[in-house]
Image (cartoon, rainbow, N blue to C red):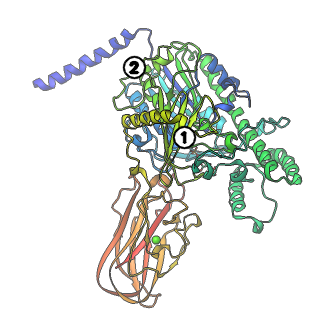
Amino acid sequence: MDRRKFMQQAGQGAFLFAVPSLLQSCGSKKRPNILYIMADDHGYQAISCYNGKLNQTPNIDRLAKDGVRFENSFCTNSICAPSRAVMLTGKFSHINGQIDNRVTFDGSQQTFPKLLRKAGYQTAIIGKWHLKSSPTGFDYWHILPGQGHYYNPEFIEMGERKKHTGYVTDLITDFSLDWLDNRDQKKPFCLLLHHKASHRNWMPDAKHLSMYDDVEIPMPETFFDDYATRSEAAKTQEMEIGKYMYLAYDLKVPPVQPPEKDSPREKTGRKYWQMIYGRLNKEQKKAWDAEYGPKNKKFRQAHLHGKELAKWKFQRYIKDYLRCIASLDENIGRVLDYLDEHGLAENTIVVYTSDQGFYLGEHGWFDKRFMYEESLRMPLIFRYPKEIKPVVDENDMVQNVDFAPTFLDYAGVKIPADMQGRSLRPVLAGRTPDDWRKAIYYHYFEYPAVHMVKRHYGVRTKRYKLIHYYYDIDAWELYDLQQDPHELNNIYDNPKYASVVKELKEELQKLREKYKDTDVTRFLPKKSVAVNHKAEGCKVTLKHAYAAKYSGGGANALTDGVQAPGNLTTFNDNPVWQGFEQVDLDAVIDLKKEMEINQVATGFLQEIGSWIFLPPVVEYSVSQDGTHFTSIGRVKNEVPMKNPRTLKRNFKLSVKNVRAGYLRVHAKNIGICPSWHPGAGGKAWLFADEVVVR
Ligand code: SGN
Ligand code: CA
């Protein structure tokens, strides 16, 4: 044996000896289990221990009674996938890359579950995931595809897709308890238990459908807000309950008129409604019809309009929302009971939170996104009897970027220097460091998009909040939360607050530098470009229709002289990509006259998280008469199908001595998502634009 080999083996031996003694030296300090429970869109207003006046949540309260409940807990970007990515990485959105719900999470990066697993923890994620790429860093994963469904949902268990009968909140809890039962008892565990509830469209469990029937839920005082002092951003959002909720899909009042009479909005609402109602089995439908049927009849007979209609919509919305919370709370009770019964309560850190807050009628809204209090604040409770004394923390400002370092700290794992959050462990122990943050930083990116909340970033201190809206607007808002807790009075231009504005702008700049978010331009949508080419304006005949949702602006989008950019962020203001669901793109272009062709190129998009794949092959053929085509060549895809990035490729073919009156482009669609993909078995998309002929 040579010296180097000997040293290596001796080294390993030493390591093997070191491990047990290391564990022993910790003595009774068994590493804690971590049970992280996160709801979706659960606003603190709907939790009774948060002084919520709307409902009772005895089980969440039970957790709070024995733990620390934070009053000043905030997200960094109030939307689902970004919040989840921040929690996993301990980094802000602009660093971890998950700026909005549209991009795909880069699962190859460092996350706290990966680090815990490396340190000997058994890790699992059960429930909503929503990060598009498959989970990494978990011994076990059992997730909902995309948003998932409330009733009889499909789940993907370690890559295998299966439909289950039942209600989603119960099922997620069942799977979690099963996993706890079958886990490796020799290792500490870290379980991320992520509920779908209480996300839109708020479908309660059948047993809760008549809850709150005889009461009227108090409306927030800002329900009829007129946004008088606010910027355009607050005025142009599409979150108003009165205006933007679908009667059928959101409020469960299916249309009675014949479909021909539907307005375009009603058409969409009806389609969504048919889809979700269609998932219920016979028994479930019976229960739903029995509950909603008579109530809907009364509603129709009342012929409500204007404010009265908005008030009715609020009641239906909030009651369904709270019914979903009832089931959430009961199921949290089941998990807490399990911990008690198995002697796990003492040594398990239990967290309850939501991916962000939610509007329950404040400002007339539902949804989230804005930096205003209701969606910025997250409910947050930590229970760990071994180390944490029960208290309500009204002082310390904490953020979801702190969760990853906190868990690592408790597990005795070194916190990587590139994590941007800070461990809450001393704060939870009642020893808040002197240099703890006095201001939080926020940045929201998803615009233009559903709900049309403009891009903004800002800073919040204990007393003030300064927001800057940008991109297609340049507007500032300032609120004095002490004087104006409902944020109705934007005082940015009030000269009395000039010095406050100045200080806050300095603070904001400091935070942007500290967190490395000084360049907003790199996340702005790319623009489509105009191109001149020989087939511009030519008629396109498709063998298989494009999907109406992604029309690319109409039938001739492939030759309209506008070339789609390398992403999807051009929203309804600028639809350029043409999408084909499961079918091939098979297009004949009438070139109007015989011409010489030297090159043809068609742009295709890959964004696997949105189930959009590049075609495996594109074949080009030409014809003189439009009926008999001869192939001029094929272009094969060279990008790996698993590449998680959003990317555009031009499938380009150069030819010589080709004359033609018609060009045929045939691009293969892969058909269905492959087995390794989170959408396994679902229909795959092909996105094309533009066919350039030179
Ligand atoms: C869906 C909802 C939106 C919601 C987003 C994001 N519409 O698009 O209301 O804001 O999800 O929610 S729906 O018609 O599909 O219900 S998130 O929780 O994933 O961020
Ligand atoms: Ca085009």
Q: Is residue 248 visible?
A: yes
Q: Is residue 87 visible?
A: no
Amino acid marked by disc 1: Tyr
User: Disc 1 to disc 2, how far (Cα)?
Assistant: 45 Å
Question: x%, y% of residue 595?
Answer: 36, 88
- Check the image and report above or below for 412 versus 416: above
Earlier sequence position, callout 1 versus callout 2:
2
Which residue is located at x 46 percent, y 62 percent? 670
Question: x%, y% of residue 631?
Answer: 37, 80
Q: Residue at the left extreme?
A: 2
Which residue is located at x 69 percent, y 59 percent? 271
For residue 616, what is the image quadrant? bottom left
Q: Which mark is residue 77?
A: none
Give the quadrant of the C terminus: bottom left
Which residue is located at x 75 percent, y 44 percent? 314
The count of marks equals: 2
Q: Which mark is residue 492?
A: 1
360 lies left or right of 503: right
Q: Find disc 2 in the rendering and name its residue.
A: 412
Amino acid marked by disc 2: Gly
Of residue 124 and residue 420, the one placed in the foreground of this image is 420
Q: Is mark 1 on a helix, strand or loop?
A: loop
- Check the image and report above or below for 85 versus 437: below
Question: x%, y% of residue 547?
Answer: 57, 66
Q: Residue at the front extreme?
A: 495
Question: x%, y% of residue 470?
Answer: 48, 49
Give the quadrant of the N terminus: top left
